Image (cartoon, grey):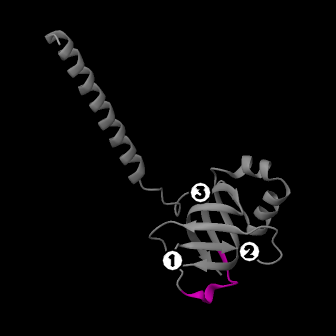
Amino acid sequence: MTKHKSRILLSIMILLLMAIAIGAGYLLYEYRKLSPDLTGKKADFSMSAKKLAEEFHLNETIAAQNYTGKILEVSGPVKEINSEEDLLILGDSSYPLMISCALKPGSEKLISHEVMQVNVVVRGVCTGYLLDVQLNNGVIINKN
């Protein structure tokens, strides 16, 4: 190999390694970026859990267009609590669908099952419908 070809090959390898390092750094940054705290954020829509469930049940496509990616403030009765996964399910037997709210890590833990059937207000980002209407990064705003 000539000296000129080896320099070109070395330059290409250095550029390739730099591109890989920059890409890996960006992916790590995005992975570790904290989700915004929704406690102080204004909700795009505020409604009852039953109304939200009915809208997704009647026309999932339109409801997904209206609510996906938006901050929703939803009120309704607590049906189920999964403290290990910080998951709160809103609804009762009269609802066509349930509302599943994944609480923000580090938010208030719901260890006590005393809040079952108690109305709560949660704020979260709607990510669509998958067996239940999904809210993520949720925070509990109020317990009644």
Of the pair 15 and 49, the residue shown nearer to us: 15
Q: Is mark 3 on a helix, strand or loop?
A: loop
Dot label at residue 45:
none
The residues colored magenta run 112-120
Locate the C terminus by quadrant: bottom right
Residue type at tag 2: Gly
Query: Quadrant where the N terminus lies?
Result: top left
Q: Percent position (x, y) of residue 102?
A: 57, 66
* Residue under the point 59% across and 57% down: 42
Where in the figure is residue 21, as x and y percent of width and height? 29, 37
The residue that disc 2 covers is: 91
Residue with the most extreme front position:
1
- Residue at the spot of label 3: 42
**Relative image position of residue 137 (x, y in whole percent):** 54, 61
Q: Nearer the viewer, mark 2 or mark 3?
A: 2
Q: Do the residues labelled 2 and 3 touch (CB within 8 Å)?
A: no
Front position in the image: 116 or 14: 14
In reply to whether residue 48 is colored magenta, the answer given is no
Up-down relation of residue 105 to residue 8 (above or below): below
Element carrying mark 1: loop
Of the numbered discs 3 and 1, the one sitting upstream in the chain is 3
First along the sequence among labels 2 and 3 = 3
Q: Name the residue beneath numbered marker 1.
A: 84
Q: What residue type is labelled 3?
A: Lys
Which of discs 3 and 1 lies nearer the camera? The answer is 1
| Residue type indicated by callout 1 | Glu
Q: In which quarter of the image is residue 57?
A: bottom right
Q: Quadrant of residue 50?
A: bottom right
